[in-house]
Image (cartoon, rainbow, N blue to C red):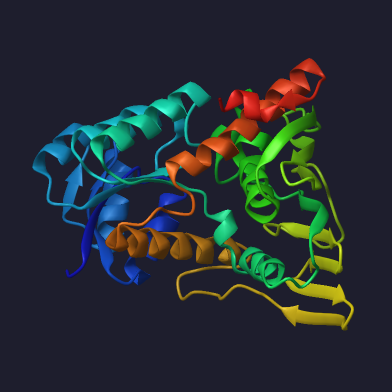
Amino acid sequence: MTGLKGALIGCGFFAINQMHAWKDVDGAGIVAICDRDPERLKIVGDQFGIVRRYSDAEAMFADGGFDFVDIATTVQSHRALVEMAARNKVPAICQKPFAKTLADARAMVEACRAAGVALMVHENFRWQTPIQAVRKALDAGAIGTPFWGRFSFRSGYDVFSGQPYLAEGERFIIEDLGIHTLDIARYILGDVSGLTARTKRVNPRIRGEDVATILLDHENGATSVVDVSYATRLPKEPFPETLIELDGSEGTIRLTQGYGLEITNGRGTTRMDVAPKLLSWASRPWHNIQESVFAIEQHWVDQLKRGAEHSTSGADNLKTFALVEAAYDSAAQGRTIDVRAMLR
């Protein structure tokens, strides 16, 4: 193959999307895979024609022959694997959630900085076509200066059927889904100074929270609400859409169910379709997320070749990760959390 050679660690549920996307990315491809489960290793290796297969990451790094590593494991192994990549001077993509704690996340960023290698978190939701369309409209000045926003993901979709481990953790919706929605809020309205959160568990069959409502005070003076739920049954299931409302000094933006974008300002109301493409390997309703996996992987390759910072670099993601930690702290303590203090 030509271009950058990559290795993938973790051949689980979501990694299949990453492997499909790597086949479409211009300028890179996967040449080695690693997983402790021999059955998953065989399934993914056979499906994508990967000859180099490892059950041990250290052995894979020792053999080398790749330019970057895509870490698609669960969060418990992230720090060890990122630090392993740093020791081997290999740029790394790390699946979200980035780490178990903010301290671990800082250590991972520092390890890659000291090694002089790029680190990007696979925070793909901001790369969804409809989210990018909202950002472009805002950057074009369509509604002036935004002062209020709402970022909403409310669903009754059974995510536990494909990922049963999600029902077992003491933390659920903020750590698994809210992290994406909080990152979108940061991406659209900027960094956050203060945060107040409330959580609830509606589904008695899970351990963690499945509903969260989070109030954000942005550093630029804007206020936003992030609300996420996997306990909401609607007439038409919106999964996996993030709906957005923005009010600005000169108008409003609404990203509505069905991937409609409405912009209202002094020139009237403009409506457009911002639906994601249905890639050849994708399936509805997951195609929105699947397309964003391709987009972030292409971004990784393009920026790596340029030697430029990634949109969701490890350093940038510390600010999103801090919002997750602040949300859990706020919900537990019943008070507003100073996010800036957490990042000092």
Question: Would residue 111 appear left or right of 320 to someone viewing this image?
Answer: left
Residue 171 shows up from this direction: no
- Count of all numbered marks drawn on residues in the image: 0
Query: Where 82 falls versus 71 (above or below)?
Result: above
Task: Locate residue 116, reporting x and y percent.
Answer: 26, 41
Query: Where 158 falls versus 108 (above or below)?
Result: below
Question: Would residue 118 appear left or right of 266 to someone viewing this image?
Answer: left
Question: Would residue 195 appear left or right of 248 to someone viewing this image?
Answer: left
Task: Locate residue 174, reporting x and y percent.
Answer: 67, 35
Question: Would residue 63 appear left or right of 169 to someone viewing this image?
Answer: left
Residue located 69% across and 25% down the image? 328
Nearer to us in this view, 289 or 236: 289
- Residue lying at the far top of the rendered structure: 333
Nearer to us in this view, 148 or 243: 148
Task: Locate residue 125, reporting x and y percent.
Answer: 58, 55
Residue 63 shows up from this direction: yes
Residue located 79% across and 42% down the image? 231
Indicate the quadrant containing the C terminus: top left, top right, bottom left or bottom right: top right
Indicate the quadrant containing the N terminus: top left, top right, bottom left or bottom right: bottom left
Task: Locate residue 340, reporting x and y percent.
Answer: 64, 29
Query: Where 156 falls versus 49 (above or below)?
Result: above
Nearer to us in this view, 231 or 319: 319
